[in-house]
Image: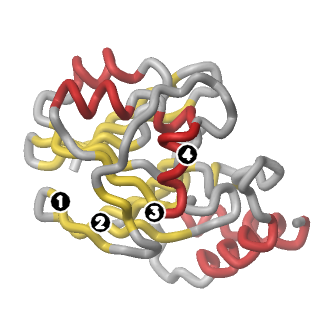
């Protein structure tokens, strides 16, 4: 498995191309992601959204239509793809597959789990492939996703933090913004945030 990433748009939202045996999964195609994906993904098979915020889903529709590939989005954030709740002019897209909380799907012979970590958004998820966790806006290097947006929930975030602190696997984390880290490296930070919220 090979991973390419590039920060997109004004918020530097990481878009990921995950190559598995010459076919690719696209994770969180944000603002302006289309041309980079077109150059770097020759055989994409699906788009995976960690959550529904505009800076993570902006290029969903353009990429889905061009490559004729489906969109997988956490079930509780699907409404954001259609409704543009922050009024940024986000191009509308439609989830072909509404992924249930903690559901495991199979793509490219890999079991892929959408761990449900609500708080930042109702459907906020971290996508696990082998020992990699694409954490979206749940966990960053030294920080966590904001809980002061519309549809955010501070109490849900606390539960999510407690849940991930109990994970025994030391996932390598590829976040929605900033550089990669590991779950073990972040546990002290996560405990501090849990106490702060």
Q: What whole-number distance in Å separates the C-alpha atoms at marks 3 and 1?
A: 18 Å
Marks 4,2: beta carbons within 8 A: no
Residue 99 appears at what percent x and percent y? 38, 65
Marks 1,4: beta carbons within 8 A: no
Q: What whole-number distance in Å separates the C-alpha atoms at marks 1 and 4?
A: 24 Å
The residue under label 3 is 75
Marks 3,4: beta carbons within 8 A: no
Q: What whole-number distance in Å separates the C-alpha atoms at marks 4 and 2?
A: 22 Å
Residue 138 appears at what percent x and percent y? 62, 57
Lower position in the chain sequence, tag 3 or tag 1: 3
Q: Nearer the viewer, mark 4 or mark 2?
A: 4
The residue under label 1 is 107
The residue under label 4 is 80
State the scheme by which the image is colored. Answer: secondary structure
The residue under label 2 is 112
Residue 102 lies, with reference to residue 17, above or below; the image says below
Marks 3,1: beta carbons within 8 A: no
Q: Residue at x 45, y 63 (%)?
A: 75
Q: Tell which of 42 and 47 is nearer to you.
A: 47
Lower position in the chain sequence, tag 2 or tag 3: 3
Residue 63 appears at what percent x and percent y? 28, 28
SS state under label 4: helix
């Amino acid at each position: 498995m090979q991973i390419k990433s590039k920060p997109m748009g004004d918020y530097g939202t990481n878009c990921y191309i995950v190559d598995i045996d010459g076919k690719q999964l696209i994770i969180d195609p944000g603002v302006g992601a289309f041309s980079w994906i077109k150059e770097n993904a020759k055989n994409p098979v699906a788009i995976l959204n960690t959550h529904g915020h505009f800076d993570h889903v902006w290029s969903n529709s353009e990429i889905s239509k061009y490559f004729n590939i489906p969109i997988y989005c956490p079930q509780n954030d699907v409404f954001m793809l259609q409704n543009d709740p922050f009024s940024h002019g986000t191009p509308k897209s439609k989830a072909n597959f509404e992924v249930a909380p903690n559901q495991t799907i199979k793509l490219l012979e890999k079991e892929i789990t959408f761990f449900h970590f609500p708080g930042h958004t109702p459907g906020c998820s971290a996508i696990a492939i082998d020992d990699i966790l694409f954490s979206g806006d749940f966990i960053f290097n030294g920080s966590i996703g904001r809980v002061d947006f519309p549809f955010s929930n501070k109490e849900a975030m606390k539960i999510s933090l407690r849940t991930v602190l109990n994970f025994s696997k030391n996932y390598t984390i590829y976040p929605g913004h900033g550089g990669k880290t590991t779950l073990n490296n972040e546990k002290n930070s996560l405990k501090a945030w849990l106490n702060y919220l």
